Amino acid sequence: MNNISLSSKILKVSKGQLEIKNGVFTLYAFIIYYEGKFEEHYALVNSKDWKIDESVPFRINSACITSEVFGCEKCDCKWQLDEAIHYIAEMGFGIITYHPSHEGSGHGIFEKLNSFNELGTDNTSYIDLNCEKEDARNFLPALIILDYFKITEVTLLGNNLKKIDFLMENGINISKIVNLIYNGSNRTTKRYILLKGRKPEHFALRKGK
């Protein structure tokens, strides 16, 4: 994996079983050191006994406390997480990496709430809030976790072209992409999807795949 430097490493691992509505999963907690900082990242795993050359269902999931914890329907984040868990449960194996530092596209909860206040539901741009870039997320921790589980081939659950490009550029073979396209009826969520689909990295939303 090209992008994992010698200074990037997992310093601590803890795990425990979670009994959720989709079955029994194992939650791994990692303390990862990379690019001069320490961060916690997680992995929700259903059966870690996959074959080395097997394509593992996989999602990179950015934290969204507003939807995943408090049920806000402005975005499709909780819906996508639930769909990914359901897909993995149906397949019988898979992994979701979960990244708290990705909240608000990597800008954090403060800027995310500012975007709610200043921009409402009709605009999702962080550039308008004077952030240096729209998406500040770093996907390297997901790569480090895949390396921990010795996963080199995945069935990717998601729609983001940036994630696809990052994985492929760093030695992960994507054998299949399962797009997670919101199919609910909530008008606020559907408006968000419409605007999200205008961004280049969310081409799949425009195609309706």
Image (tube, rainbow, N blue to C red):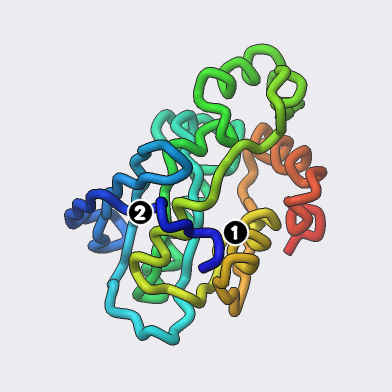
Q: Amino acid at mark 1?
A: Gly
Q: Could you tell me which quadrant the C terminus lies in? A: bottom right
Q: Of the numbered discs in the image, which one, if any, rests on residue 158?
A: 1
Q: Nearer the viewer, residue 25 or 82?
A: 25
Q: Nearer the viewer, residue 43 or 71?
A: 43
Going by the image, does 87 lie left or right of 138? left
User: Could you tell me residue 95's position as x and y percent?
Assistant: 39, 64
Can you tell which of label 2 and label 1 is closer to the viewer? 2
Q: Amino acid at mark 2?
A: Lys
User: Could you tell me residue 198's position as x and y percent?
Assistant: 82, 43
Going by the image, does 100 lie left or right of 129? left
Going by the image, does 48 lie left or right of 177? left
Q: Nearer the viewer, residue 141 or 177?
A: 141
Q: Secondary structure at mark 2?
A: strand
Identify the residue at image location x=42%, y=48%.
Answer: 98
Give the residue at mark 2: 9
Q: Residues within 10 Å of mark 2 (few under 14, many from 20)?
A: some
First in residue order: circle 2 vs circle 1: 2
Residue positioned most to the top: 118
Identify the residue at image location x=23%, y=53%.
Answer: 13
Residue positioned most to the front: 6
Identify the residue at image location x=59%, y=36%.
Answer: 105
Answer above or below: position of 33 versus 74.
below
